[in-house]
Image (cartoon, rainbow, N blue to C red):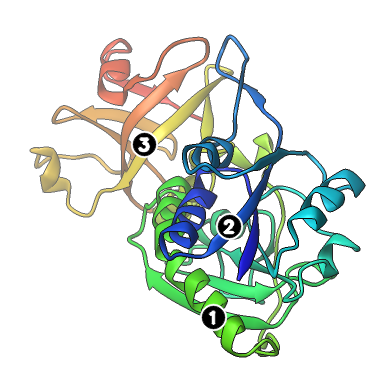
Amino acid sequence: MKIVFAGTPEFAVPSLRALVAAGHEVVGVITREDAPHGRKRVLTPSPVATAAEELGLPVLRANTLDDAATAWAAALAPDLGVIVAYGGLVREPLLSLPSHGWINLHFSELPRWRGAAPVQRALEAGEQTLGVTVFRLVAALDAGDVLTRDAREFAPGTSAGAALTELADFGTAAVLEAVSLLASDPAAGEPQRGEETYARKLTREDGKIDLARPAPVVLAHWAGVTPEPGAYALHEGQPLKLLELAPLAETSDLGATDVDLAAAPGTVTLIGGAAVLTTSDGPLLLRRVQPAGKPAMEAAAWLRGRDGQAVLA
């Protein structure tokens, strides 16, 4: 089939590369316009744009799938549209343009976690089984018939960034299977069944961690907002980014036998060369932090400059 692909971030690149490697005719790629990145705000192509150009594929940069994008896609006469994290809605008449419609790789087990941040919200809710679903795109949000799906387990403390990277590679098999299924049966697909939940977009305020909650809840919240929008707590009224946080199952891991776990929640103490963060019911290992206006550093080094202890709120 002739495929037009729409996607933008790094998480969409494995699907694009997999379609090309499998021998499918990708006739064009739509991605969002170059965006400023870094402290110097240099205009930078999206990861999908870079990959498409490496593969020698025609690229359209567009922040909305408007009439111009529709006309561009129509000239390619695609049989199928494949979208992975493009960052915009596909509306009519583009939605009905390909003869086989559009399919979408979504990073959840639909209908759970429809919306913009499925992996982030699932991790924040304490879920460790994360899935992928390839479904038919329809006008309603993430509501089309399911073609393929799969899932796998992730360890507690796996960040959303790490989970998305793994799911992006893992999900390519589901995309290829869905394309093959449609090629043999254009009417394929089954209605979604189960509880519908919505994964709303994350904001900076979502990154504020409540350290007075139990350790598993704190770790889950941290995982869901890392790396974006970024987890943080307040130290002396200023935000302190919590870049790396991990479970601490055994205090013997610290090389200390007299660990005081009775400190108030939010207390970070240098113990056995490690930064130990106290929550309401147990410790976590704080590995890396970034103070306001300063570069990232090891949490233990940050604590050594504060006599081995700090209190976060």
**Which comes before the other along the chain, label 1 or label 2?**
2
Q: Residues within 10 Å of mark 3 (few under 14, many from 20)?
A: many
Q: Is residue 296 left or right of residue 182?
A: left
Q: Is residue 300 left or right of residue 173?
A: left
Q: Which residue is mark 1?
A: 148
Marks 1 and 2 close (CB-CB < 8 Å) = no
**Which comes before the other along the chain, label 3 or label 2?**
2
Q: Position of residue 2 (x, y in %)?
A: 63, 65
The residue under label 3 is which amino acid type? Answer: Glu
Q: Secondary structure at mark 1?
A: strand
Q: Which residue is mark 3?
A: 244
Is 312 rendered above or below residue 72? above
Q: CA distance from mark 1 to mark 2?
A: 21 Å
Q: Residues within 10 Å of mark 1 (few under 14, many from 20)?
A: many
Q: Which residue is mark 2?
A: 26
Q: Position of residue 186 (x, y in %)?
A: 67, 86
The residue under label 1 is which amino acid type? Answer: Thr
The residue under label 2 is which amino acid type? Answer: Val
Is 267 rendered above or below residue 184? above
Q: Position of residue 12 (x, y in %)?
A: 54, 51
Residue at position x 41%, y 32% in the image: 243
186 or 129, which is in the foreground?
186
